[in-house]
């Protein structure tokens, strides 16, 4: 039986998708690239000749030992990618363990970088790119889309991995950009509260009468709409 590594990771074995990930990142010769969960190094080996430096973060001691032995030119960080200190980097190209996709992405979006290409569960990718007033649209959609342009580059079948997951995956490209609107300091808290009770109308979910879009529900508000709501609440009655 194939060994299942921690945190729900499935090793990428189809080199075609590794190549697509590297190509989608548009790497430059002087780039520093962050890779999370290098596993057996299928993606890492394609990154090394395309950039100045690869920093790989691996939590599994045995896998980390393998990377250190087989790819000594890679800078290896041992530990949890959500918690370890990251160096400055230009691009992130990673096959993310499913269980850290959300916390990793939120940390990534709070960091300065040029581009990220991430291999994630397709359901997660669909939520990232979801449009307003669709079933997949939620807090993740709002917080990603206010900070970056996100696109699905390719769907990846279970057979591209070892062991194969029970779901499809997808390559997503994340390109940071400044928000198209002013973001009040209470923005994230408002979005979180609204989606915590997404079936309620905004006025009831936030306990605030006279708030903009009071009769709408969280899933019907765009990222910019949430900024108007947050600004209203910050200004007070």
Image (cartoon, rainbow, N blue to C red):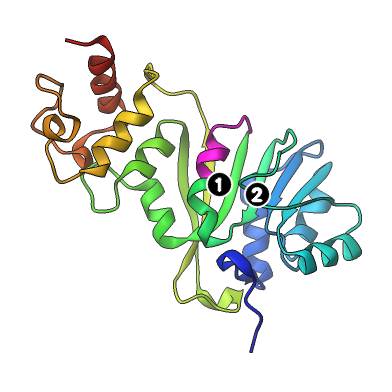
The image quadrant that residue 230 belongs to is: top left
* Helix, strand or loop under label 1: helix
- Which is nearer the eye, 75 or 6? 6
Task: Give the residue at mark 2.
Answer: 81
Task: Count up the numbered dots.
Answer: 2
The image quadrant that residue 159 belongs to is: bottom right
Q: Position of residue 215 (x, y in %)?
A: 8, 32
Q: Position of residue 228 (x, y in %)?
A: 25, 20
In the drawing, what numbered circle is on residue 104?
1
What's the residue at 76%, 52% (across, down)?
Answer: 56
- Which is nearer the eye, 159 or 234? 234
> Is 106 contained in the magenta span?
yes
**Disc 1 + disc 2, Cβ < 8 Å:** yes
Q: Position of residue 146 (x, y in %)?
A: 40, 31
> Is 34 contained in the magenta span?
no
Q: Measured along the vertical axis of the image, is residue 63 above or below residue 183? A: below
The residue carrying pointer 1 sits among few (fewer than 14), some (14 to 19) or many (20 or more) residues within 10 Å by Cα, namely some
What's the residue at 70%, 35% (across, down)?
Answer: 90
| Furthest residue toward bottom | 1
Earlier in the chain: of badge 1 and badge 2, it is 2
User: Which range of residues does the magenta coloring cover?
Assistant: 105-113
* Helix, strand or loop under label 2: loop
């Amino acid at each position: 039986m194939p060994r299942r590594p921690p945190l729900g990771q499935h090793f990428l074995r189809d080199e075609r998708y590794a190549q697509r990930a590297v190509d989608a990142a548009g790497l430059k010769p002087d780039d520093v690239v962050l890779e999370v969960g290098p596993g057996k190094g299928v993606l890492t080996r394609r990154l090394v000749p395309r950039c100045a430096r690869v920093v790989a973060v691996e939590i599994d001691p045995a896998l980390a030992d393998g990377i250190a032995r087989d790819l000594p030119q890679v800078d290896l960080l041992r530990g949890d990618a959500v918690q370890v200190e990251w160096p400055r980097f230009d691009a992130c190209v990673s096959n993310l363990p499913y269980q850290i996709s959300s916390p990793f992405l939120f940390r990534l979006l709070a960091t300065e970088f040029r581009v990220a290409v991430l291999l994630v569960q397709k359901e997660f990718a669909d939520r990232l790119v979801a449009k307003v007033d669709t079933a997949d649209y939620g807090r993740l959609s709002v917080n990603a889309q206010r900070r970056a342009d996100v696109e699905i580059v390719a769907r990846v079948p279970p057979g591209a991995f070892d062991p194969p997951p029970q779901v499809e995956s997808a390559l997503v490209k994340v390109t940071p950009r400044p928000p198209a609107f002013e973001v009040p300091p209470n923005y994230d808290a408002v979005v979180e509260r609204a989606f915590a009770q997404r079936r309620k109308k905004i006025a009831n979910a936030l306990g605030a009468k006279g708030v903009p879009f009071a009769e709408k529900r969280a899933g019907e508000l765009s990222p910019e709409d949430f900024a108007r709501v947050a600004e209203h609440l910050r200004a007070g009655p």
